[in-house]
Image (spheres, helix red, strand yellow):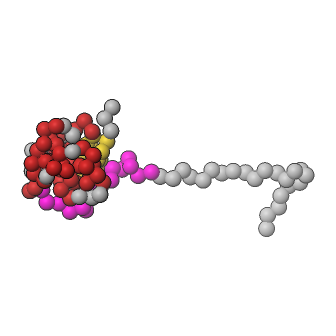
Amino acid sequence: MADTIWKSRYKGVDYEVTTRDLTVSRLRQMKQWFGAEYGKYTPFITLLVEGDVDALACVVWIAQSKAGEKPQEPRNLDFSIEDFEKFEEDVVEPDPEPDVAADPPPDGTTPTTG
């Protein structure tokens, strides 16, 4: 199973890029556009994690290609970080505090309040 390397909602559309999507042809193309580091898996992932905007543009290009869209080349892609949103499924709600009744005192008396 392929690992997810990037998942986001971009301009209202949900996208996911996995390790399977980083094909040799895509890495070669990114290397031509942006340099040697973009053609190597680990350095590319590092650039993405560090917030490199060209790496982010590349994953948008990959995601849109994978979705059957006709994406712009990453060099021509302009976006704001505000164009990205987390998936709703990524939002984790904390569990509510359980209602726990206090244990009775060991002497059998009923506790009093107040």
Look at 83% across and 58% down and name the residue there: 111
Query: Residue 90 in magenta?
Result: yes
Look at 13% across and 60% down and name the residue there: 78
55 relative to 1 in the view: left or right: left
Question: Which range of residues does the magenta coloring cover?
Answer: 77-92
User: In front: 45, or 113?
Assistant: 45
Q: Residue furthest right?
A: 107
49 relative to 99 in the view: left or right: left
- Residue 65 lies, in percent from the top left, at 14, 42
Query: Residue 106 in magenta?
Result: no
- Residue 58 lies, in percent from the top left, at 17, 50
Look at 79% across and 68% down and name the residue there: 114
Look at 41% across and 52% down and name the residue there: 91
- Residue 69 lies, in percent from the top left, at 12, 43
Q: Residue furthest front?
A: 36
As drawn, 85 above or below 25: below
In the picture, which quadrant includes the N terminus?
A: top left
One can see residue 25 in this view: yes
Q: Residue furthest top?
A: 1
As drawn, 94 above or below 80: above
64 relative to 92 in the view: left or right: left
